[in-house]
Amino acid sequence: MEVTALCIKLFFLVMIVMLLLSEHDQKVYAASLHIDPNREQFFKYESLTFHCEGVSYCEVVDESNRKIPSCNKTNRRTSTGSSCTITNVYPADSGKYWFDAGEGERSNSVNITVTAGSVILEIPALPVMEGETVTLTCRNKTTSSQTSAHFYHYGDLISNSSTGNMTIHNVSMSDEGLYKCSIFRAGESAESRLIVKDGQTETVTISSKETVTSSSSPSPWMIVPVILLVRLVLMGLLYFVKYFWHRGFRES
């Protein structure tokens, strides 16, 4: 009976440690900011929605800690957090946004650029994973039909498109950088950055002054105690089996 009790205690100890590790991961990665539509550039008067994952109230701020007034009126709960909508964006709204998740933790940041001009480059505001396919679109405010466009990477012409789209297959880190586009007689877009993640690591901002890099695979500090506890449980079970094996022989 003592051996059985020991095994039960070891089992519950493993479960408790796994739950604590799971809660730690959720706390680190819960604070994330998304944007819909997922693009960095917008025309004046367009609308966008911020999604704050992991918090009950979506209160985004910009680099000057300016809060978005319309978020107070449009804030609503979602299955994973909350969201708020800006119904009309203006060039003055351009910049970097994030939200405070509490306890000194801050979400990732999202850049938006709002133009009063006629051309924007539809480019993802959020990082894309290495190996994915990404399509950049050069859009003319005055027409919804497909328009030929030129695409530039760090100012160098890289594509002439008759459809206004440029697709990058199997994105790599070399594709990261500043892009813009131009449409004949309509103008040129602003320049925005395409961010590519290698799929192995990501940077989690836990305060305004401190960043840490976290691997997508389990870290050693998580693996070691779990392995030790599993070994203890296995040793306990082995002892349990041997105990009853020999006891069975003695009683037979």
Image: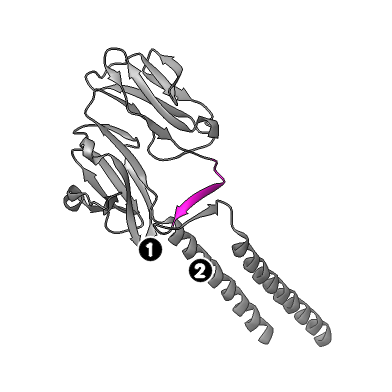
Identify the residue at horizontal 45%, vertical 17% (top origin). 159
Kindly report the distance in space between the C-alpha atoms of the residues bearing marks 1 and 2: 20 Å
Q: Is residue 106 above or below residue 93?
A: below
Q: Name the residue nearer the viewer: 247 or 40.
A: 40
Q: Name the residue nearer the viewer: 147 or 106.
A: 106
Point out the frontmost of discs 1 and 2. 1
Q: Which amino acid lies under the numbered mark 1 shown in the image of this protein? A: Gly
Left or right, 156 with reference to 109 = right
SS label for mark 2:
helix
- Look at mark 2 in the image and give the residue it sits on: 20
Q: Which amino acid lies under the numbered mark 2 shown in the image of this protein? A: Leu
- Look at mark 1 in the image and give the residue it sits on: 104
Q: Tell me which colouring the rendered structure shows.
A: one colour
Left or right, 8 with reference to 208 = right
Identify the residue at horizontal 36%, vertical 44% (top origin). 110
- Magenta span covers which residues? 198-205
